[in-house]
Amino acid sequence: MKAKELAQLISTKSAPVILDVRSGMEFNSGHIPGAIHAPSMRILLSMAHLPKDKNSRLVITCEHGPRAQMAQGLLSLYGYKNSTLLEGHMSGWRNAGLKMER
């Protein structure tokens, strides 16, 4: 999903569940509004706060991509079938000047 498309969905309150799989320090330095902090290790250990509905639409992001790809694979193994990666990830979101929260 493109960053501006996600920003538009957020502004209309129709955004999918946004999972930010970066470290706590990275997440706390700024994240997409409404994002859930769900590092890959917490997903692996079933400790992340994930939607109960495994058909929920998910957008996964990290800083540059590899952690998000790993998280998407884990989520797929756990039965989540409707996930996508944020194009450009957080570096792209920031470079686009889109709103962030702390």
Image (cartoon, rainbow, N blue to C red):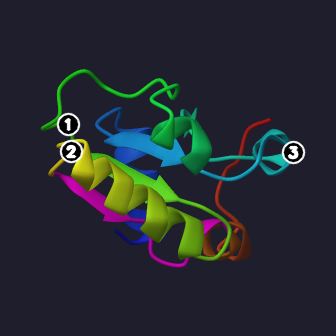
Residue 16 at x, y percent in the picture? 31, 42
Task: Say left or right for 88 vs 24.
Answer: left
Task: Say left or right for 46 vs 96.
Answer: left
Give me the C-alpha separation between circle 3 and circle 2. Answer: 26 Å
Tag shown at residue 80 = 2
User: What residue is rendered at 56% in x and 38% in y?
Assistant: 38
Task: Say left or right for 26 vs 39.
Answer: right
Q: Is residue 73 magenta?
A: no
User: What residue is rendered at 56% in x and 49% in y?
Assistant: 40
Residue extending farthest to the front is 45
Task: Say left or right for 39 vs 2.
Answer: right
Q: Quadrant of the N terminus?
A: bottom left
Tell me where residue 95 sits by quadrant: bottom right
- Of badges 2 and 1, the one in the foreground is 2
Q: Residues within 10 Å of mark 3 (few under 14, many from 20)?
A: few
Residue 71 at x, y percent in the picture? 45, 56
Q: Which residue range is magenta in the image?
A: 82-90
Closer to the camera in the image, 71 or 93: 71
Circle 1 SS class: loop
Tag shown at residue 73 = none
Residue of label 1: 56
Q: Residues within 10 Å of mark 2 (few under 14, many from 20)?
A: many
Residue of label 3: 25
Q: Earlier in the sequence, mark 1 or mark 3?
A: 3
Disc 3 + disc 2, Cβ < 8 Å? no
Circle 3 SS class: helix
Q: Earlier in the sequence, mark 3 or mark 2?
A: 3
Disc 2 + disc 1, Cβ < 8 Å? yes
Q: Residues within 10 Å of mark 1 (few under 14, many from 20)?
A: some
Check disc 2 and give the amino acid type. Answer: Tyr
Tell me where residue 35 sits by quadrant: top right
Above or below — where is 91 with respect to 100? below
